């Protein structure tokens, strides 16, 4: 089996490659980039070896991109579209002089706020990381980090550059996946940020179906609070978040796409005294102990709105896990507030009972949150199509 492709993150070589794409000749590319023709030829040769095949068809009329060349050029252009504006804002020459090693060092220091921790993360010596950041600051002619007793605090420009560096590298990861697909290899990955509703209902169906089409394609599901998943999405570590959408959209560089509308339901253990009661009043529920979603979530806001005239119930357990809620309700007389879609998964199996409450819950939009600039690979796009089809079937 061939080894997985790894596109060298040599920014200079990628810029020379794009210059050949745009000019059509080695000579013109060399002149444009102020380097020798052998330097351009060597850069293209290294990229072709790493890409698993020819990037250009060489003819007397010039260099014309192969399908591999077209894929790499598209992703490289997207990478530099992320990176170059952030570099140029710091200093006009940085797009030409900054190296990946410097950008990786800056990103690691920005995230760890410490040279020693950054070096450990990168597997380098601390002086090497310090030197890379210092070189970048000298070239920029400005300080990018404030040295404080609490650590290295990144400037606004450094924070932006670190973010753009991550997104640029994510584009090259996508290039590797798409180039590998030309050889019939399952390379790449899909990383999904999973909010509570999706974990027990929507994702299992979508992933199971996806596995029948792509049995070996890596899929990672990350659970966590919304803010943590959103940060990972914006850094390029997560491809999409699935769950309740926010109103308004939390920040301008992400896009929300609704898949279906969901309501809330009130669940109880099968032994609860309210089960079978002819008329359950809001006051009866107010006296109960509750298992509720975390503060700041759309479901929690609806729960608090339901009791706005009485004030919040006295006994609350905050939990984002349906498994924990199920066990608490089964072992006690607590009641729980969760998505009606999740409730169906519990009640149809006889694990919990839904209490017949007329609450007039407002519908909550459930859907996808992605980076506005994200362009999925064919495998990722296939998963999205499966996910949307599954969501349509689950829609109340």
Image (cartoon, rainbow, N blue to C red):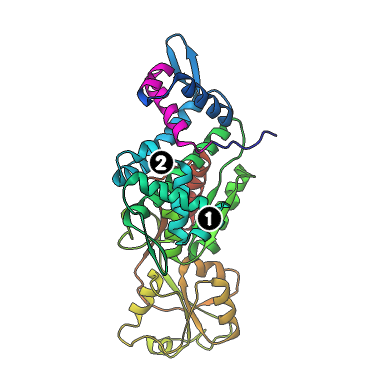
Q: Position of residue 348 (x, y in %)?
A: 57, 68
Left or right of residue 351, residue 114 in this image: left
Camera-side residue: 265 or 129? 129
Camera-side residue: 200 or 43? 43
Residue 221 in which image quadrant:
bottom right
Residue 12 magenta-highlighted: yes
Instruction: State which region is magenta.
Output: 8-31
> Which quarter of the rendered picture does the N terminus lie within?
top right
| Nearer-N-terminus badge (1/2) | 2
Within 10 angstroms of label 1, few (less than 14), some, or many (20 or more) residues? some
Q: Where is residue 51 in the image (x, y as percent from the top left)?
A: 56, 30
Q: Is mark 1 on a helix, strand or loop?
A: helix
Residue 287 in which image quadrant:
bottom left
**Which residue in the protein does label 2 denote?**
98
Within 10 angstroms of label 2, few (less than 14), some, or many (20 or more) residues? some
Point out which mark residue 287 bears: none
- Can residue 145 be seen in this snapshot? yes
Camera-side residue: 368 or 189? 189
**Which residue in the protein does label 1 denote?**
126
Residue 259 magenta-highlighted: no
Q: Is mark 2 on a helix, strand or loop?
A: loop
- As displayed, is residue 348 above or below residue 277? above
- The structure residue drawn at horizontal position 47% and vertical position 61%, both measured from the top left corner, is 114
Number of the front mark, 1 or 2: 1
């Amino acid at each position: 089996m061939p080894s997985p492709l790894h596109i060298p993150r040599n920014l200079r070589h990628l810029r020379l490659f794009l210059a050949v794409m745009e000019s059509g000749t080695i000579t013109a590319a060399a002149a444009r980039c102020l380097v020798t023709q052998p330097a351009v030829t060597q850069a293209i040769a290294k990229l072709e070896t790493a890409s698993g095949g020819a990037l250009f068809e060489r003819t007397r009329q010039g260099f014309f991109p192969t399908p591999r060349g077209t894929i790499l050029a598209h992703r490289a252009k997207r990478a530099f579209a992320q990176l170059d504006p952030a570099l140029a804002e710091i200093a006009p020459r940085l797009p030409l002089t900054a190296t990946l090693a410097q950008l990786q060092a800056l990103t690691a220091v920005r995230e760890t706020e410490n040279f020693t921790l950054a070096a450990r993360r990168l597997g380098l010596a601390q002086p090497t990381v310090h030197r890379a950041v210092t070189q970048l600051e000298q070239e920029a002619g400005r300080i990018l980090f404030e040295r404080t007793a609490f650590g290295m605090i990144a400037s606004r420009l450094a924070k932006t550059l670190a973010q753009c560096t991550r997104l640029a590298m994510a584009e090259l990861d996508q290039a590797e996946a798409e180039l590998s697909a030309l050889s019939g290899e399952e390379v790449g990955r899909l990383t999904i940020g999973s909010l509570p509703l999706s974990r027990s209902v929507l994702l299992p169906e979508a992933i199971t179906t996806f596995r029948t089409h792509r049995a070996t394609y890596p899929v990672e599901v990350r659970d966590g609070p919304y803010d943590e998943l959103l940060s990972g999405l914006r850094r390029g570590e997560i491809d999409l978040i699935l769950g309740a959408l926010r109103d308004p959209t939390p920040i301008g560089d992400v896009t929300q796409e609704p898949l279906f509308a969901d309501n809330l339901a009130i669940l109880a253990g099968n032994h609860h005294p309210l089960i079978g009661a002819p008329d359950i009043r809001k006051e009866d529920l107010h006296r109960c102990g509750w298992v509720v979603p975390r503060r700041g979530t759309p479901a929690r806001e609806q729960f608090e709105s339901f009791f706005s005239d009485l004030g919040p119930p006295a006994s609350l357990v905050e939990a984002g896990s349906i498994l924990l809620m199920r066990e608490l309700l089964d072992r006690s007389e607590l009641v729980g507030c969760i998505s009606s879609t999740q409730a169906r998964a519990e009640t149809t199996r006889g694990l919990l009972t839904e209490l017949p409450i007329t609450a007039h819950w407002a519908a909550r939009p459930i859907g996808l949150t992605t980076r506005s600039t994200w362009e999925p690979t064919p495998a990722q796009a296939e998963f999205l199509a499966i996910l949307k089809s599954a969501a349509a079937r689950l829609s109340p």
